[in-house]
Image (spheres, coloured by chain):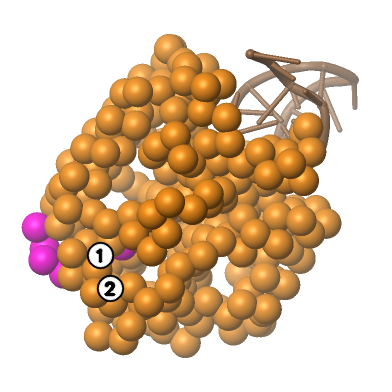
Chain colours: A orange, B brown
Amino acid sequence: MKIATYNVNGINGRLPVLLRWLQETSPDVVCLQELKAPQEKFPEQAIREIGYQAIWHGQKSWNGVAILTRNLEIEEVRRGLPGDDEDEQSRYIEANVNGIRIAGLYLPNGNPAPGPKFDYKMSWFSRLQAHAKELLSLNEPVILTGDFNVMPTEKDVYKPERWGEDALFRPEVRAAFKELTDQGWTDALRKLYPEETIYTFWDYFRNAYQRNAGLRIDHFLLSPQLEDRLLAAGVDKEVRGWEKTSDHAPVWIELKDA
DNA sequence: ATGCCGTGGAAACCACGA
């Protein structure tokens, strides 16, 4: 089973790219972030026509997350991360698919830091840690995936010395990510490629993609029940070079059948 | 070092992203 995550940066503006990528790579499950569309503007018909069903949590202008599947039933478990009833932002959706609990997330950016946006990021992060702990206690196969807006280590940044104060790389953010993984989650891409330079995002300007000035911020975290089922993982880097493309590239893993 | 690009929505610019 192939599972992918893709921050599309506007699902309607990006629809031709998304459909082409889905048709060329045929992932079984896809988590999308940054739909930037209200609930009723999700392009369900176009996605259905190429063989995918979907659940989504939209929001006007910003955020928005979805889970797509091909020939697999989606049983939605929750939308919205627990721990703050006041949080209106659409950044989290969770479902059971083919015996796996899949959480698709879009962790807040947090810039500028310090400030209220950074505080929101850190509080969202602690809510995620708390919920992730709950999910681990199920002792079932669970995947946390999406745009974490965190480069976990210096290897994940093209120029780490320039990013130390940034909300994606500040020490407390990296510490929060480590605290999360230390619960027992496996960073799937790093497990298979411990030393490689792997990026999932390149800025639109300064020819970042051409210079490979990238960041690794889209991740797959696997519960212990999935560790031995990880067959392969990668980044569909060429998609970042397409016309009218997102600033993120799709990331995927392949799992052995249970 | 930096929103230099790009999106969406409202308004003919602004908020936001990483």
Look at mark 2 in the image and give the residue it sits on: A100
Residue type, mark 2 in image: Ile
Tell me, yes or no, whether the highlighted magenta stretch contains residue A25.
no
The mark total stands at 2
Quadrant in which residue A254 is drawn = bottom left
Which chain does the numbered disc 1 sit on?
A
Q: Do the residues labelled 1 and 2 touch (CB within 8 Å)?
A: yes
Query: Residue A254's mark?
Result: none
Relative to A8, is A68 above or below? Answer: below
> Which quarter of the figure has residue A94?
bottom left
Q: Left or right: where does residue A243 sit relative to residue A56?
A: right
Residue shown at 30% from the left, 38% from the top: A177
Image coordinates for residue B6, horizontal then vertical, percent: 78, 42
Q: Name the residue under label 1.
A: A142
Towards the viewer: B15 or A226:
A226
- Rendered residue at 51%/45% (across/down): A216
Residue A2 is left or right of residue A245, and the answer is: left
A142 part of magenta stretch: yes
Q: Are marks 1 and 2 on the same chain?
A: yes
Q: Nearer the viewer, residue A114 or B9?
A: A114
Q: Is mark 1 on a helix, strand or loop?
A: strand
Give x and y (percent) for residue A7: 57, 52
Q: Foreground residue, A76 or A121?
A: A121
Residue A210 in view, yes or no: yes
Report the span colored magenta. Answer: A137-145
